[in-house]
Each structure stands twice: as structure tokens, then as C-alpha cells.
Image (cartoon, grey):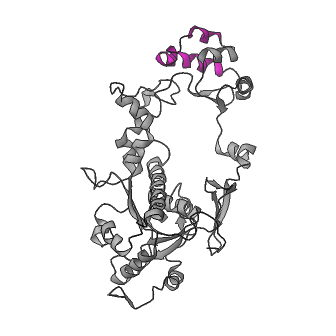
Amino acid sequence: MSATDSRPLAGLLVLDMSQFLSGPSAALRLADLGADVIKIERPQQGDLCRQLYISNLELDGDSTLFHTINRNKRSYAADLKNPEDLARVRKLIERADVLIQNFRPGVMEGIGLDYEKVRKINPRLVYGVVTGYGTQGPWVKLPGQDLLVQSRSGLVWLNGDASQGPVPFGLAVADMLAGAHLVQGLLACLVRRGITGEGGLVEVSLLESTLDFQFEVLTTHLNDGRRSPSRSTINNAHAYLGAPYGIYKSADGYLALAMGSVTRLGQLLECDALAVFADPRSWFEQRDEIKQVLVEHIATRPTTEWLAKLEAADYWCAPVMDWNELLEHDGFKVLDFLQDVVRDNGASMVTTRCPIRLDGLALKASRGSPTVGEHNVAIDAEFDLRMGVVKGSVI
């Protein structure tokens, strides 16, 4: 870390003892904000995410998913069942500001690194935990996997059309949300530590994060007679919003329409059939009938023609773009959202940067993900983890 590093978390030491997506994504964001993140992983095999492939794509022996979620970190290989390695990790914990782990409940207690024991080693430590379903109840020991959590949370009944049955998100949304919530809790606890000097325990679960993601519609359900969400049978985009909300096929592509007056839309699109829906209540109660009219009408002309009419009137709409179209558009290019990251051995890849800007500057870091145990020697020297006696344990 540079002595002139002005990022807000510069000088903080984070131990990332998590694997897969949720915990490592939180540690990644802390690294983007300036923290020195040491990824503690098992020797040889390392984080299991190294072999969790997306489209079978790999780089330098690891999955691109691992590279993406673990860039800008250092790796320290340690077998936590080995007393010597465990003693070294405990000494790192003495110096750390944050520790993140997402082992199943009971694992860290078994090796003596649960929060109650660790806080005695370092009372200033902020200790972050990610679980699948919390620490109590009948689901505690079940695998906290993204699709399984989506399925238990009710989220899958909000996607797709009414005729499709449950439809999952095409992203690991539970993992990513839990990681983001963990960062929020860790930063809040660090602020409190700056006032009181005391660390703390931050806990999030994939299930609770996915439930929070649904807070608007779940609150509606709780206060609306607990009626099940009713998805459109035509172009559903939100189970609780009326027409025209959805995506429509045009003559040469697709057009997205958000909230807006149906009668005003009819005027702008020169669609007289929409004039009969003057009562705003009909926009929800008769949304499939309205959407069917729009499906037939919008299909008659190209997307650009519809956009010209709607954008000029400030009606909420957008073209539906694929990634290639997005990447070539000036609206994307001006964000400067891509960066090259490089391993010490020269292996490189293109990925996204941190989405946060500080003082007007985008946060980029070119260091790629580490190989397993790549930084053991340097970390041993930096934190004096040499062979000897550490807190009564021989290492």
C-alpha cells in the first residue's frame, strides 16, 4: 500500500476467511476502498470458488469468477487444523481490523476462532459473518446456496409471466446482496469503533438479504390481506405494477416502458385503442388487456421510431440493449467502468471497477487475484509470523 493512499480504508487490515461469493465480494469492496485484504485459504486447493466455473472459462488455472471476486487481495495459505498455521492466523487476528468468515455455524467454534474467543484476542476487531439462514432454527445446517435461498424466499414468484411458474434471477442475487449488506454493517461498526474503541459482531444471512430485497412488495403483501403476487400474463416486469410496465417487441428490437399514463401513451404512439382506459385503476385491473394492445401496436414500427416520439415527450422508456450494444455506446464509455487487472506472473483479464466514486475519482486497482499462498513469505515477514513462540503456542 502506498504511503500516499488517500482512499478512506487505507491502513486497515482485513482478513478474508470466506469463500465462494458473498463474503469475498464484501472483502473485495473493502479492498477497493483502500483496505489491505489478506485472503486466508487452505493450502493447495484454496477457495473452492477457484474451480467454480462460469461457461467453463478459466485463466491461469483459476475460474474467471474467482479472478473477478478476488482481485486486489493477497493470499495466505493456512491449514486451520494445523496448530502451527492456526497460531500464525491468530497472530494476524491480533493485528487485524476486520475478519470475514462464512463457514457453516459451528465450524469456527470448533477451531476456536468464533467471535467470543476472537474478541479476547483483539477487542477492537470487527467480525463479519455470512450464513445461509441465520444461526437459529431448522434451516441452520442446510446449504446456503443462492438458488436454494431464492427458492425459499419467495423471490422466484415475482419473475417471469404468470404462466411460467417460479422463475429465478439469472444472477447470484442472494450472494451479492448479502455481501453488500455485510459491507454496510462492517463500515457502521468501524465508525462506532472510532468513537468507543470497541469492535463488534456483524451478521448477515443470504435469506434475510433476499427478504430485504423484496421489502416493498413483501410489505404490500403483509398489509393487503396476504394475497399472493399476481404477475401479468403478458410481458410481466413487476407483479405489483400496472400497464404499461414491461418490455415489448418492436419491428426490429425491443422497447422498455416504465410507469406512465396509459392514455398519454396512446396519444404519443397514435394508438387510439388505449383511449378507453381513462380510469387509472384500470391500468392495473386490466393490465393484460392494455398490454395486449401495446404488443400488437409496438410490433409495427422500429424501436428508434417509438423512442423518438416518447423521449421527446419525456415519457419513461428505453431501448433494450445487449452487452455488445452497451459496451459500444458513449453512455457506457463515459463511465470508464472497465479495467485491466494483472497477476504478478503476467496473466491478465478485463473486468469491471468499483462502482463507487470518491472525490470525483473512479476507484481502480490493477492487482489481479492471487495464487494460493502467493504472499505467505511476504506476510510472514511483514507481521513477524516467524517460527517461535506466539502467545504460548509453539510454532
Q: Is residue 279 magenta?
A: yes
Question: How many marks do you count on the picture?
Answer: 0
Relative to 294, 126 lies left or right: left
State whether residue 388 is above or below residue 53.
below
Q: Quick check: is 126 in the magenta stretch?
A: no
Residue that protrudes farthest toward the top in the picture: 276
Whole-percent x, y for residue 40 in the image: 45, 72
| Residue 43 visible in the shown view | no
Q: Residue at x 38, y 47 (%)?
A: 208
Occupied quadrant, residue 349: bottom right
Q: Quadrant of residue 320?
A: top right
Q: Please give the name of the residue rendered at 46% of the width and 62% of the height, measured from the top-left corner.
A: 195
Q: Quadrant of the N terminus?
A: bottom right
- Residue 323 appears in the rendering: yes
Question: Vertically, is 169 above or below 266?
Answer: below
- Which quadrant would the C terminus be assigned to in this image? bottom left
Relative to 145, is 284 on the left or the right?
right
Question: Relative to residue 176, is residue 47 depicted above or below?
Answer: below
- Bounds of the magenta span? 271-299
Establish if 305 lies above or below 340: above
Instruction: Give the main secondary structure, helix, strand or loop, of the magenta stretch.
Output: helix
Q: Residue furthest bottom?
A: 388
Q: Nearer the viewer, residue 81 or 131?
A: 131
Residue 302 image offset from top left, x and y in percent: 71, 26
Q: Residue furthest front?
A: 195
Q: Residue 113 location, x and y as percent?
A: 33, 71
Q: Residue at x 47, y 49 (%)?
A: 177
Q: State the residue in front, 316 or 128.
A: 128
